[in-house]
Amino acid sequence: MSFFTYKDLEIKYIVDGNLKSNKEVIVILNGIMMSCNSWEAFKEPFSNNNTLIRYDMVDQGESSKVNYDYSQELQLEVLHELLNHLQLDKVNIVGISYGASIALQYVIKYPNKVNKIVIANGVAKTSSWLKAIGDGWNEVAATRNGLCYYNITIPYIYSPEFYIKNIQWMEDRKEFLLPIFSNHLFLDSMVRLTKSAETHDVIKGLSSIENKTLIIAGEEDFLTPVFEQVYLNENIKNSHLVVIPKCGHASMYEVPELFTSLSLGFINNDQIKII
């Protein structure tokens, strides 16, 4: 675990593997409520044949918390500075949800820094639908009621079938998350993160993306529905779309083996040619 400084912000990052090797470098971009620790179970498969970089964005995990509103441009430049700090010329990016938005913005602004990109449960623009959901989250966050915040956010992240079939796992997650969700500092961070996503809009830039792109969708994603990923696929010329049946917004948690296989298979296989 290490930290680097961007302006007056301390950003936590973890490198799994050797940056001086010839292996592909994969940078994972967190969903809005995630941190480096959220990917711990993925560390081994993602770093077996690659170098994995995880980091906490501003207002996430152990990185700096701020006391002002910002746009996702801040997160974009933090990522860029991290890659410069590590002296990386080109990386592969895997972004989910909030992280998918940052990934799309980054590849449009800095295309030469990116090899391949995986967009999971992402959108081209924060719609009125998604903003209304975020507004609801923030209204509940203002009550400082951790249980209410949990109930308005977490159940809808998963597909109904997964939630019901894995109810004990969900209850264990609830027990773990409730103290965190009851912390006013965490809630304030979540409000800022949610607000920062309101202006996400890369519709005009999608046609400029020439990097190889894999788009992962969940058939039962109620936050970023499948039509959003279909739109990305139709407007990013070098992209492929995989829709996972019976899967919700948290694809990496619902189908971790498939999420890993899709991401690594796409990033690591350049040698297959059909003649």
Image: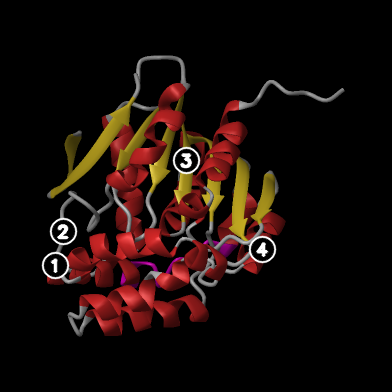
Tell me the CA gap for discs 3 and 4: 20 Å
Q: Secondary structure at mark 4?
A: helix
Q: Is residue 219 visible?
A: yes
Q: Which mark is residue 93?
A: 3
Of callouts 2 and 3, the N-terminal one:
2
The residue located at (33%, 44%) in the rendering is: 79
Check disc 4 and report the residue beneath it. 231
Q: Quick one: 162 or 87, which is closer to the camera?
A: 162
Labels 3 and 4: the sequence-earlier one: 3
**Badge nearest the viewer, 4 or 1:** 1
Residue 211 percent coordinates (x, y): 60, 40
Q: Count neighbours of disc 4 (C-alpha within 10 A) and say few if under 14, some if 14 to 19, many if 20 or more.
A: some
Find out whether the residues at labels 2 and 4 contact each other: C-beta distance under 8 Å: no
Magenta range:
195-203
In this rendering, position of residue 5 left or right of residue 93: left
Q: Earlier in the sequence, mark 3 or mark 1?
A: 3
Q: Main secondary structure of the magenta part?
A: loop
Between 186 and 274, the residue placed more toward the observer is: 186
Give me the disc on residue 185.
1
The disc label shown at residue 81, or none? none
